[in-house]
Amino acid sequence: MAIQWTAITAASDIEHILSRSNEVPCLIFKHSTSCNISAIAKYRLEDDWRAGKDELEPYYLDLLRYRGISNQLAETFNVYHESPQVLLISGGECIYDASHLDISVEELTEALNAV
């Protein structure tokens, strides 16, 4: 099952994710398009993806184009900025984050099952 990313392109998208996370968990993938590790993490995430749209809403941030939004995400969810990075948002809170090659569907699934 392919990931159907929704692009984050404006600060207002963060408010949308906060609101949506009260209905369905939301995944944010912060991707540096010029970084090989980020490309590998994205590929691994997409290759192992099994969650349906009703289980988890996936969002994608192009870190190089929207660095200010990345900084706002770090502040909003009280996480240290890293790239690549995933944030799992549920009930308006970041309940799981991982970066670099620690990003895995298995760990995301475990965190999601704990919700």
Image (cartoon, grey):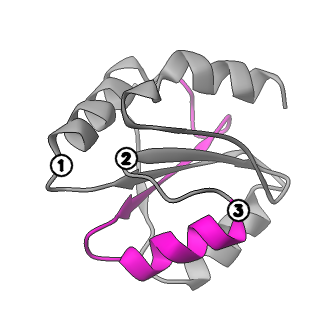
State if disc 1 and disc 3 touch (CB < 8 Å): no
Q: What's the residue type where badge 3 is placed?
A: Phe
The residue tagged 3 is 77
SS at circle 2: loop
Residue drawn 47% across the image and 83% down it: 10
Residue drawn 82% across the image and 52% down it: 23
Is the residue 43 above or below the residue 67 in the image? above
Rounded to the nearest angstrom, the CA distance separating label 3 from label 2 is 16 Å
Rounded to the nearest angstrom, the CA distance separating label 3 from label 1 is 24 Å
The residue tagged 2 is 84
Looking at the picture, how far across and down is residue 41, in whole percent?
32, 33
Q: Is residue 16 left or right of residue 61?
A: right
The residue tagged 1 is 35
* Residue stretch rendered in magenta on the structure: 51-78
Q: Nearer the viewer, residue 18 or 54?
A: 18
State if disc 1 and disc 2 touch (CB < 8 Å): yes
Mark 2 burial class by Cα count in 10 Å: few <14, some 14-19, many 20+: many
Which quarter of the picture shows residue 62? bottom left
